[in-house]
Amino acid sequence: MAKVKTSYFCQNCGYQSPKWLGRCPSCGEWNTMVEEIIQKSEPEKGRWRPASAGPNIAARPKAITEIDYSEQPRVLTPDAELNRVLGGGIVPGSLVLIGGEPGIGKSTLMLQIALNLPGIRVLYVSGEESDQQIKMRAERLGTNSANCFILTETSTQNIFKQIENFEPDLLVIDSIQTLQSNLVESGAGSVSQVRECTAELMKFAKESGTPVFMIGHITKDGNLAGPKVLEHMVDTVLQFEGDRHLAYRILRTTKNRFGSTSELGIYEMQGSGLRQVSNPSEILISQREDALSGITIGTMLEGNRPLLIEIQSLVSIATYGTPQRSSTGFDAKRLNMLLAVLEKRGGFRLGAQDVFLNIAGGLKVEDPAIDLAVCASLVSSYEDIAIPASVCFAAEVGLGGEVRAVNRIENRIAEAEKLGFKEIWVSRYNAKGLDLDQYKIRVRTASKLDEVFISLLR
């Protein structure tokens, strides 16, 4: 008879303890230790094994020069945004985890990918919805594919039996928290179940070369549910972000063993599914007819993609005591630093003013290249003088009030020119060695903030 034992797992980080503890020694969280029953069964029961698997042979060390390597081509999907986020397409044998809030569109995105992959057999395993519900979503997407097969199952033992018979080219799991392995006696969604099921899927992906996409739930803090080791096990972690009450969604990479972690893809949620936004700068810049003070356009980089974003600010006299400092999508400490620079180096009396700053479109920006745009927006609102809509900015601001150079200025200028801007302000140090005659847009240079404000607000 199988030996049964219990252990305590931290639901936050996965720390295991033989006895209950009030506080987890690993992550420091209180009251997160939960008792789970662990049953040691036969080692191969319920696990995936290739059809030709023979007796287990211990692996031997190899010299790195003895290892045969041939780069396998990536699988390009019809979704250019997903290809960019993954680093150029789906890598064979990769394990990808997609997380996001409930109702954000994770299942819609994966079903849309599964239905539109040409010539690839996809097995879509759902533990949350019935096959009729998935068919209803497919009808709403307006796409049908004879290569997309649906399996509603939660037992990994039954899933791997179907995989051996079906031999899919791509596997989608919706979601990893609903799967249950017979090697562990705890309930679905527990730390031990999530870890064991992920380990089995990872073994299947690496040995068979089949890419696996897993959908994961998140906690109320926005982190992926389950042990932190889950993110270490997978090859790629994608975060699907956005307000579910708004139309636009952002697919962001937080880990990628096969590409950059600074790429993002932008989608628009429509009644017929997710639409790729190939030119996100157009949706991040409002189409306004009247000239308004406090609105400027700055350039930022997300991975290899230049974006032009709209910065909105409101500066008004503080009538309720202590002046307020509020920012949405921009670091509040950096905002306070820029306000101090404007007051000390520019002579603007902002100490008794309420300051509100907003990055349009719901983006969170960390690129220092929008510093000059933020300063121009604040001064424009303070002086109540509108900055022309055909002007944009791409420069960092230092504590001495100097306009500093930023990286990849050519890409930023080219993006501004493509969107029809007539003028862009950059650092004078960026202009060194730059052929300004190749651009139709007028490139203005400055080394101090005063030069920019005298030209724009005179």
Image (cartoon, rainbow, N blue to C red):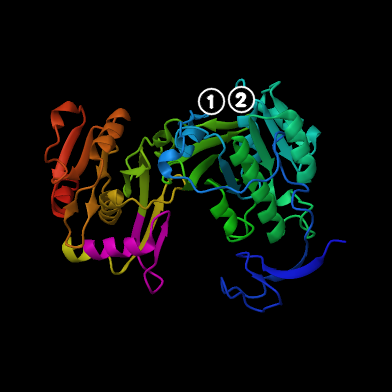
**Residue 148, quarter of picture:** top right
Check residue 375 for magenta coloring.
Answer: no
**Residue 449 x/y as whole percent:** 17, 53
**Residue 138, quarter of picture:** top right
Answer above or below: position of 226 versus 290. Answer: below
Give the position of the N terminus as an image quadrant.
bottom right
Given residues 304 and 154, the one toward you in this image is 154
Q: Residue furthest right?
A: 1
Check residue 341 for magenta coloring.
Answer: yes
Q: Identify the residue at horizontal 28%, vertical 45% (top origin).
A: 386
Judged from the image, the secondary structure of the residue bearing numbered disc 2 is helix
Given residues 66 and 90, the one toward you in this image is 66
**Residue 231 x/y as whole percent:** 56, 53
Verify CB contact (< 8 Å) between mark 1 and mark 2.
yes
Give the residue number, with chain letter if any, for mark 1: 78
**Residue 294 x/y as whole percent:** 32, 50
Instruction: Read off the magenta span.
Output: 314-342
Q: Identify the residue at horizontal 79%, vertical 68% (top origin).
A: 5
Task: Please state if 381 lies on the left or on the right of 114 as rendered.
Answer: left
Task: Please state if 299 lies on the left or on the right of 348 as rendered.
Answer: right
Q: Which mark is residue 116?
A: 2
CA separation, marks 1 and 2?
A: 7 Å
Q: Identify the residue at horizontal 21%, vertical 30% (top origin).
A: 441
Mark 1 or mark 2: which comes first in sequence? 1
Amino acid on which disc 1 is placed: Pro
Judged from the image, the secondary structure of the residue bearing numbered disc 1 is loop
